[in-house]
Image: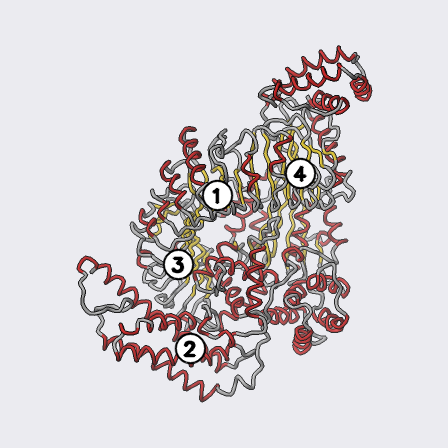
Amino acid sequence: MGSSLAVMSAMDDALVNSSLADIGAMNAPVSSSLGVMGPLLRKLDSLLLLGCRLRGPLKDRVVLLREDLEEISVALVEQSMVDSPNEMAKYWMNEVRELCYDIEDFIDDMMLTHADAKMRSVQSFKVGRVKIPWLPKKVRPCTRAAKFAELRAPVREAIERHGRYLDGFTSSSRSLFTVYGHIPLMYAEAANYLVGVNDANTKLVKWLTNEKEQQLKMVAITGHSGVGKTALAKQLYREVEEQFDCRAFVRASRKPDMRRLLGGILSQVQQHRCPTNSYTVQNLIDKLTEHLQNKRYVIVIDDLWETTSWDIVASAFPEGNNCSRIITTTEIEGVALECCDYQSDNILKMKPLGGEDSGKLLLNLVFGPERLCPEQLKGASDIIIAKCAGLPLATICVSGLLATQPDNPKLWLHVQEFLCSNLSTNSTLEETLHETLKLSYNSLPHYLKTCLMYLCLYPEGCTIWKFDLIKQWIAEDFICAIEGTDTAEVADSYFEELVNRGMIQPVDINYSGEVLSCTLHHVVLDLITLESTEERFITALDYSQTIRGHYSKVRRLSLHFSNPRYAKKPTGLTLSKVRSIGFFGILKCAPTIVGFKHLRVLILEFWGDQWGIMSFDLTRICRFFQLRYLKISCDASVEVELPTQMRMLRYLETLIIDAAVSAVPSDIIHLPGLLHLSLGDKTDLPDEVGRIRSLRVLHCFNLSSNSEDNVLSLGDLLNLQDLNLTYCTEESDDHLKRNLAALASSLGKLVNLKSITLAPGASGTAIYHDVWSSVSSLPFFLQRLELLPPICIFSRLPQCLGQLRKLCILTVVVSELLMEDMDILTGLPALTVFSLYVRQPTLESIIFKKRAFLGLKCFKYTCGVLSLTFQEEAFPNLQRLELSFNAHRGEQYYDFLSGIGYLLNLKEIAGTIGAAKDAEESDRRVAESAFTDAIRKHPRFPSYNHVKRVDWVHEEYQLRTQAKDSSREKYETLEKQHGRKEGDSLHEQTRILLKETGEETKQCTNSCQMIKFSLGLDSDPTKQRPIASNPLDSRLSLMIVLFRC
């Protein structure tokens, strides 16, 4: 987060009060408005740098073409800054962009032809005349010169037409009001702030959790676009989800893909335990019905548009008396009635916010909750709030614009004038939403418009992952990196700004406030689709659409063919010029992958529509020499055939294959520009993976199938920043332990590593192996370390974790946890999320001392026995606490969550309670009651508190049982020594234990040490430090140990 803000700050310094005209086309990246003008000019400059290598006529032609393009670029920049260009100007700009694409394609073809010729003649190289590296030898100089002259002719014509018809147009037209600047208040957090719906929210929560209504019930939330239906549904879901056995939140669309929708529900209710994309719709319905039978579940279906979709989905939900609930949101009242079996009492009709709530939302987003609106801006703010008509989406988007420069009166005046001139008092809510979104879109800088428009590539309603999206932006050359900044960091800052402007909606947000995935509101999607169509930027088609006329020549193509009944291959498309393809649908409609020699981005997400294994031929991608990004995802019924060699794809940066493949080309280790590699956990990497020195991200590296040498070679990937490892097959423990040891020796060399994730696949058993035992230090820049159970279990918390000052996320499993172990981590300043799994029951309360874990926001603690103590000022920023433990037979819970009231910023508490082998139902109820009572002691009683039952929380019973037997014998001896009688109360037992002093205290302390030794806490009782420094503390320690046992 900090790095992104730094990048945005650097961009502000460079761009505030500047425009695209100031920057110039020469330095511009690829964009929807300028096309490839910037990269083309830079390419021609590189060609002219060869100087003496170009012969006279050829050099002259290149120079003239370069000058003409420079001249036309100035006019293109001016036209792109006009607020509402006329149709003639739009046509002229489209023509110029197409010319630039064609010229760049020609130059790229020459470069590749020469590269091929050079490789073929490398064995017969001889010194002679100086050759042009980028131009094919087989083409004569006069032919090359003639081709450049031919390319120049339409450029000259475009210049002349601009002079005749458009020269005076820009001076008399209004310019776009482009606003630069980052937003200090994160929209991702503020957008979750609901206003004006408290009463409705409270009513619905009570209805959803009412256990007296045991039958399956449905509730529908309806209202106009942008009124806040999704936000309310998310809030409801978040409040009640932990009270249900199964839960899911999915988004539909106006043309829903029922396989995707049902598969999303099944995947979530099964907690992603098995793939769902290989099932038919009926298979998915059957699987859902089977899984949800006799369970209490809550399902949210957002943005339903038709009753037929509801009928299909509803058939998967079994009736029952388990208090299950369904929540739907829709704009159409007829759909809402159908979802609720025409019971209007179960329909919530959301209305626009009132003036006070609208003002609270806007000003909170612009200035933050701690600051009031300046007096000089109150007049403008009142008018703007009124013009937003109480629509939260409109208010959020306008707030995102104003928050870039909250104290700029000119910006507030511009927004006020725009809304007043385009909206009247009689404007409909639909018109209001459209105009406010248009204002927000028009105010975006060109680079953000381009990145936002690119989301047209994805189907409506789908979840778009940030890390995929920014890699695609980079591959498309949309990102203009500032000197001294990383391109990926700049792309990340673009994504954050689009979220903060309210143009894209966050879906998954981590505890650092980072948005991991997003989606588009359908109104925003309609707006950018219209803009994209006008600028011929992306052509998006589904099975109900055709393409014709001059649009048949497409540069970026998105195909959504998910309905097998109506889907058929598109016709009338000229695909030889396509640079990007996104295909989402059934395999039989996938385009034939051939002839795409200019392709840069290829995204294929498809599935079979018949039984048996189907094959998809991708062998010809080895000829896509411009390819930079390749992602393939398909179900188990499809096998992908890759070429035997891929080393010719020297520009390839990202290779992601989540599919069964016939074989992986062994020469991918020779790809010089490969940055991101993920081949799925069931796909073997070739040997010598360490030779891909450019690699930054390596995912799904299988520790089971890879050799020890290949694991050791990971240490050669000095640029690696993100490493994801797994194991999926039942290999011998020895093999995995050798690979883990090899991994430990490799990690110390990866000085740039920021993230390590070690996760089990579908199978595998626990490995008790201290993988860090041979590592004295870990990479200094490490920010994420997740060692998920059960693949790696440490005997104790590793000491080297305390050296990771930049660590933000930590997940670790230990066999044993002692009080002093926590001191290793308490001072880590950046730690935000900490998940700790303890296998053996702790035999003393884990005490979190004053000022421990200052930055922690989420703490997840799992142990068979729960006993935690929070001292004052510990966890000062903790927001969510998740605790998992077992109920034991006869166990009492005295101060097992001591000091929880000191966690002043706590907002959510979740408890997961299992049952030990000997526990009965009454023991469960005692544990649940004690947990609930402990939560109620919190002074603010967190708004989200959930207690969930599970069968069992993992606990090593054998050790615990032996400990109980051993300690019970010693305790009976002590009972006799201290005179305890049958029937004594706990208070009386404590009084007796505290009565003794002197020599008896020493004996008691020694007994405590022996008990701790018998329970496996110390390897040598003679070396154990004293339990307490005074007699009273030692007696209390003894009492705690004895009564816990």
Q: Earlier in the sequence, mark 1 or mark 4?
A: 1
- Residue picked out by circle 2: 96
Whether residue 243 can be seen here: no
- Residue picked out by circle 3: 628
Spatial CA span between label 1 and label 3: 28 Å
In the image, which is nearer the foreground, mark 2 or mark 1?
Answer: 2
Q: Quadrant of the C terminus?
A: top right
Q: What amino acid does circle 1 point to?
A: Pro
Spatial CA span between label 3 and label 2: 25 Å
Q: Earlier in the sequence, mark 2 or mark 1?
A: 2
Is residue 961 shown above or below 355? Answer: above
Check residue 275 in the rendering and tell me which mark sits there, or answer none.
Answer: 1
Spatial CA span between label 2 and label 1: 47 Å
Q: Residues within 10 Å of mark 3 (few under 14, many from 20)?
A: many
Is residue 188 shown above or below 889? Answer: below
Residue nearest the viewer, comparing 1033 with 299: 1033
Q: Are marks 3 and 2 in contact (CB under 8 Å)?
A: no
Whether residue 894 can be seen here: yes
Q: Residues within 10 Å of mark 1 (few under 14, many from 20)?
A: few
In the image, which is nearer the foreground, mark 3 or mark 2?
Answer: 3
For numbered disc 2, what is the local secondary structure? helix
Q: Is residue 857 left or right of residue 278?
A: right
Q: Earlier in the sequence, mark 1 or mark 3?
A: 1
